[in-house]
Amino acid sequence: MMNRIIAECLPGQTRLALLEDGQLAEYYVERPGREKTAGNIYKGRVENVLPGMEAAFVQMGLQKNGFLYAGDVALSTDEFDGSAMDRPPIRKLVSPGQEILVQVTKDAHGTKGARVTTHITLPSRSLVLMPTVDYVGVSRRIEDEEERTRLKNWAESVREDGMGIILRTVASNAEPETLQQEYEELVALWRDILHTAQLRTAPACIYKDSDLLMRAVRDILNDSTSEFLIDNPESYERAHAFAQAICPEYADRIRLFDQGVDIFDYYSLEEKVDKSFQRRIWLKSGGNLIFDYTEALTVIDVNTSKFVGDRQLETTILKTNLEAVEEIAKQIRLRDIGGIILMDLIDMESPEHRNQVLSALREALAKDRTRTNVVGFTGLGLVEMTRKKVRQRVSSVLHAPCPYCGGSGQILTVESVALKVRKEWRKLIAEASPDDRFILKVHKDVADYLEAEELLEGGNLEIYRSRSLHRESFSFARIV
């Protein structure tokens, strides 16, 4: 499978699309002032400690304070033996006014501030340095046991005491010299961060993770990439130079797109993007998926809709669910949905069919670079899974809550608004004199219903009706 990376770099935003065999697989948007904070390191000040929640709020200079759990505070081995029962309470770990170095692990979302930790991680292309953790790990995607052992032995031999290393997937078969160079660069970066932190006063940003384009070079560009096309000469030069420094073997795959037309239009991506973020997604069989988001979780409903099958009911249901989980895996990755995800599949009586669907879901999710965990069926027959949540999902960048319904997706019916108008009118005329005259401004559909049902009796009233008014809005005014 060959991939193509498409990058559109404009003054107002950078957009990046990953195409796998011509199909849109991943999509990212980054805009000035709304860049992700996950990965950034701040010198923060503890604002207040919440013993009842075993957490603290940390002022970092952002719009909202960061949220630090007691479990995310790094401890030295002489303080803590690894047992959850022996971990000190939050009030003994931090105190109000204390300055601490924290890293954002989850971007702020909705009413919640960013989640932060004192366990710092610094990624490069092949490895991740963990300067506060005494640990060595190897990516689970590296399955060859001999290679895993080689990498683990190398990490144990080079790391400094008290520092940890995780070998990423691209470290497989990498030369020790390459890994050593990346390790030394990360150690030097960590020392620079510590030095900068000593010179700065909290709250202050000490280190920013790479921007979208550089992260794509670091994390996505690999053997499967046929080409990485960038439509801006300056951005191309930056990306090419960065690739020359960290992965020179792939640098020639980064190319400047200079066809004189919009790069997303050239590859017919605009329509694909628009279709991919709709609430309802149609399946090839005629079934459909419906995506609904809350702050706590994402719910995906599966419907047979137009698909009626041509055999037994159980066969129709199994086929729809198998197609659904394949598409759900693609959509979760494309929309970058994180956290708890519940799927309301079509009910299956057969345990064999249930297991078949779960296996198909896990297989489809194997392509996702973000860690996922399929928990299984709940007691109510819903499929429960989690996906590591780091960034805001793409739709939260592209869309805003509806200013009319406040994000609820619903507004009052014509009848409900009309009855509210009638109630206000009765209060008004009860206090008015017989000679008072009024005008009502209201949506045309509501006005028509009021007149048809004769709900505005008594008093002197003129009605101004307009379709441009919000259907829930109305106002009375006295005519002088």
Image (tube, grey):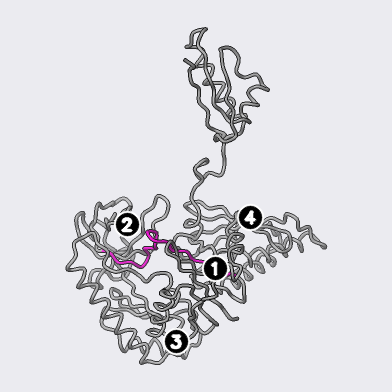
Task: Tell me which amino acid carries mark 3.
Answer: Arg
Please report whichever mark, 2 or 1, sits nearer to the chain's N-terminal start. Answer: 2
Relative to 411, say whether 301 is above or below.
below
Please tell me whether mark 1 or mark 3 is closer to you in this view.
Answer: 1
Task: Judge from the rendering whether residue 197 lies leftward or rightward of residue 137; answer left or right.
Answer: left
Numbered disc 2: secondary structure: strand
Label 1 Cα neighbours within 10 Å, binned few <14 / some 14-19 / many ≥20: few
Which residue is identified by label 3? Answer: 148
Please tell me whether mark 3 or mark 4 is closer to you in this view.
Answer: 4
Which span of residues is magenta-colored?
24-42
Toward the front, the furthest residue is 260
Label 2 Cα neighbours within 10 Å, binned few <14 / some 14-19 / many ≥20: many
Marks 1 and 3 sit apart, C-alpha to C-alpha, by 44 Å
Please tell me whether mark 4 or mark 2 is closer to you in this view.
Answer: 4
Marks 2 and 3 sit apart, C-alpha to C-alpha, by 36 Å
Numbered disc 3: secondary structure: helix
Please tell me whether mark 2 or mark 3 is closer to you in this view.
Answer: 2
Q: Residue 171, position in %: x, y?
A: 43, 85
Residue at screen point 30% across, 80% down: 186
Q: Residue 422, position in %: x, y?
A: 57, 21
Which residue is identified by label 4? Answer: 280
Relative to 438, say whether 363 is above or below.
below
Please report whichever mark, 1 or 4, sits nearer to the chain's N-terminal start. Answer: 1
Cβ atoms at labels 1 and 3 below 8 Å apart: no
Q: Residue 459, position in %: x, y?
A: 56, 12
Quarter-of-image position of residue 120: bottom left
The verdict on residue 206 being magenta is no
Which residue is identified by label 2? Answer: 66
Marks 4 and 2 sit apart, C-alpha to C-alpha, by 34 Å
Marks 1 and 4 sit apart, C-alpha to C-alpha, by 28 Å
Which residue is identified by label 1? Answer: 262
